[in-house]
Amino acid sequence: MTAVHQPPYQQNQERRRPEPPRRRRLGRLLLIGGALFCALLVTGGAAAWKFGLLSDNGKPISFGRPGDRPDPLPGRPGVSMPKGPSADFVRASRLSDGTEIGRTTLVGAKSGFTGDVWVWVPKEYKDPRYARSAFPVLISLPGGRGYPKNYWMGTGLGLQKAVTDGVRNGSSLPFILVMPVLNPDKKFYYDGSDIPGQPRMGTWMAEDVPDFVKANFRTFESRDGWAFMGSSSGGFVALKQVMKHPERFKAVIASGPETAPDSPLWHGHRAAKDANNPELLARRLIETKGPDVYVAFQIGTRETGRDKLERFIRRYGHGPVHTRLQVIEDGEHNGKSYVRGMREGSLEWISRVLLAPTPDPVAATGHDAGPDV
């Protein structure tokens, strides 16, 4: 009789024997255990990444050291190159476009206060075409206590993305965002002021923070490249700084702010309080006829305070005090609503009154075409 040759896969099927029940149960347990392990690994990895355990947050970064860049382009006045002392930054987060938010601790030489400052620079800042150009600065202040963090330093509210998108569509300048802590502790609001007997937060905000920025970044020498942005209590401080120091800062976006000091620490210091009152400071600007300042108020339709801002505009929004009100439909008293308002008009408005960076014709064309006009 001729033998019948079976294909190998049939031979293997015939040679298999039913697995004992115990072995089958063990196999199922191993499969289930493996699946659970993988799930835990993925979940734990995601959590670890969220909290920076697997990311490169906390590692040293550099935005460029003083002396790394050449002298300003001849014929282009007003560019202040960084001269140091240089700050040591660590990465706080990284955006999807590769830009980074850095954090450093600033010892205020003039105020005596020490606190953290976060900085983000747009990708244009590191573009060789702009290596000899200054960039406008937007000092961004949070609401609430603003200590020990400044909530604009995170990416969740979308402030950095709003600037990036605005640069792309031509509605925003490529701002350097500087995000200092607002208060020296969680106890009180200090109104960004030098309240007698308290930490000198007015000097910190108006002098130490700008000095730090000038030491580490390419900025404009004139006030035309300097502005504030703030929400809630940070909006008040931002408004007050521009009204009190119009020779240093030209514009502000103030979202949901008070328009008069309200810290409980002013008790017994009436003269100092009046010297930090945006309403009285605006009146003085009008009486002395300048310099011109630009105020973009923002308010959501689902929060209170609109009448207060409209009253400020009626009383003080003339002469050298240029004002506008961005009403945010369905907006609430929070950062997300205020960033939406910036996208809808405030960012474009403030960009029109500040200086823009200009590219280096040598880097752009390969030959020196002379100074930009």
Image (cartoon, rainbow, N blue to C red):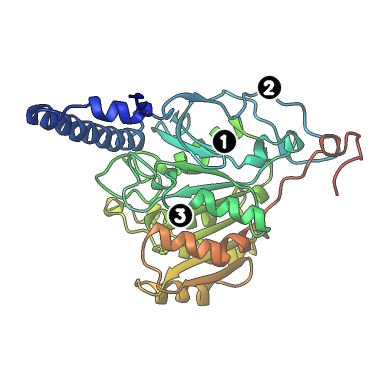
Residue 327 in the image: state x and y as whole percent.
48, 73
Q: Mark 2 points at which residue?
A: 67
Q: Quadrant of the N terminus?
A: top left
Asked if labels 1 and 3 touch by Cβ distance under 8 angstroms, the answer is no
Residue 3 vs residue 278, the one in the foreground: 3
Residue 367, label in figure: none
Residue 186 vs residue 280, the one in the foreground: 186
Up the image or down, 134 lies above or below 256; here it is: above
Q: Name the residue under label 1.
A: 213
Residue 230, label in figure: 3
Residue 153 in the image: state x and y as whole percent.
43, 43
User: Which sits earlier in the primary sequence, circle 2 or circle 3?
Assistant: 2
User: Which sits earlier in the primary sequence, circle 3 or circle 1?
Assistant: 1
Residue 277 vs residue 348, the one in the foreground: 348
Up the image or down, 95 lies above or below 12; here it is: below
Residue 309 in the image: state x and y as whole percent.
45, 71
Indicate left or right for 291 with 114 as reference.
right
User: Which sits earlier in the primary sequence, circle 2 or circle 1?
Assistant: 2
